[in-house]
Amino acid sequence: MLYEPKFYKCSKCEAIFEVITPHCCDELLCCGEYVELIKANEGHGLEDKHIPVVKREGDNLTVCVGRVLHPMSKEHNIVWVEVKSKYFEQRVTLKKGDDPIAMFQVPEKVPVTVFAYCNIHGLWKISA
């Protein structure tokens, strides 16, 4: 990747924002208040259910969220999974009740960073 993306969350409406330009300001407003920067977790004791697990087969990249699949209930779920590289970005929004699995078309040798967002435990990432 050319730069580390920045994700922000509004504490009132819980909207998530991704800044797609690296030189963007750090003072974004939503609901009349500044939104907070979200730091991606890479492992803090919850990784069994939150760290994305990546499997490649040729140009097919499958992401399962968690070594033990993350719950997908109404109260606790993975909202989206995103794959980023130097050349592209792809995101899949998941539905409550479905398995937390997303599939992407990614050239075989292209390194990616995978992000997954849990509505309770926040943003998680792994490089693959």
Image: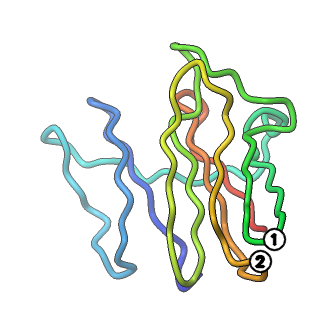
Judge from the rendering whether residue 36 lies leftward or rightward of residue 120; answer left or right.
Answer: left
In terms of image quadrants, where is residue 85?
A: bottom right
Query: Which of the 4 quarters of the picture holds residue 61?
Result: bottom right
Please indicate whether residue 43 sits to the left or right of residue 9 in the image.
right
Residue 58 circle label? 1
| Residue 73, position as x, y percentages in the image | 59, 15
The answer to whether 114 is drawn above or below residue 74 in the figure is below
Sequence-first disc among 2 and 1: 1
Residue at the image point whose x is 54% and y is 86% from the top: 2
Residue at image coords 79%, 47%: 43
**Which residue is tagged 2?**
108
Name the outermost residue toward the top. Answer: 74
Disc 1 is placed on an element classified as loop
- SS at circle 2: loop
Q: Residue at x 51, y 48 (%)?
A: 92
Residue type for callout 1: Gly
Q: Residue 86 appears at what percent x and percent y?
A: 57, 83
Tally of marks: 2
